[in-house]
Image (cartoon, helix red, strand yellow):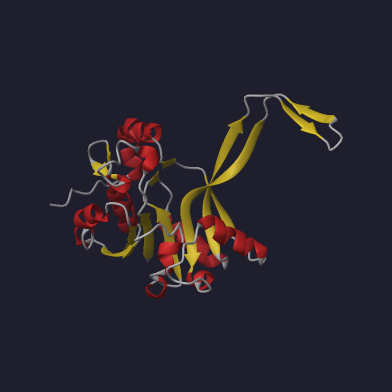
Amino acid sequence: MHAVILAGGKGTRLRPYTTSVPKPLVPIGDTYSILEIVLYQLRSQGFTHITLAVGHLSHLIRAFVSDGSRYGLSVDYTDENQPLGTIGPILNVLDKLPEHFLVMNGDILTDLKYAAFLDRHRASGRPVTVATYHRELKSEFGVLDVDESTNIVAFREKPTVKFQVSMGIYGMTRETLKHYTPGQALGFDTLMLDLLACGDHPRSDLFSGYWLDIGRPEDYDMANEQWKEMQPVLLPQPPGRPE
């Protein structure tokens, strides 16, 4: 099984931690980097081949991971000389990927079973499967519904809006991306809108376990605070650090 890990962003929201270290390499609990945790998880679930899409400070990621043999994986790389969006880097290596493969951001901590997720995507026949998570957003204000004649037609006191968000983990089918040109910038949002426009609906795979997107300093602080409790869940059999 093959996974593409998106590790090319500058991590500007996580500064100053990412000023000299790429976000996937920031340490969690002084034990492992985020990327190491993900690599060990993927290996334990049967993944054998990883493609790292790198850009910002890519030489550090290459030096740290190398060919992946230290992690029991085969790792290769695709470089972003300019920002290509979430999907753009994949287009450059599309001919080297299997028909169904995993795509994920390199700054995620979750106990999602990646292999089972990819199996569900493969069985669904959908062009893309998005791992999704329930979120609630509570308004700080009373909300008014106003019609075209400026009449207030409804009022809700500080309502809570429930919705599903993308976890940054996708089951992808190669055929879905063959219509795009290698080298072009392509965001996940554009891909979703293109698929919806032609009636080829992506699939939601709702998850209710542990998920933390480490995008902001407060998220990083939370990950470190929770690491002692979550390590047995995220890494049930902690591997030895490679020499």
Q: Residue furthest left?
A: 243
Q: Residue at x 64, y 35 (%)?
A: 161
In x, y percent, where is residue 130?
A: 53, 55
The answer to whether residue 167 is left or right of residue 58 is right
Residue 106 x %, y %: 36, 51
Q: Nearer the viewer, residue 156 or 183?
A: 183
- Residue at x-position 53% and y-position 70%: 176
Q: Which corner quadrant holds the N terminus?
A: bottom left
The x and y percentages for residue 119 are 47, 63
Left or right: 148 as drawn, with respect to 170: right
Question: Could you tell me if residue 21 is visible in this image?
Answer: yes
Q: Where residue 178 appears, x then y in whole percent?
A: 50, 74
Q: Is 58 placed left or right of 164 in the picture?
A: left
Question: On screen, 156 above or below 76?
Answer: above
Can residue 214 be seen in this snapshot?
no
In the image, what residue occupies the spot 22% across and 52% down?
A: 60
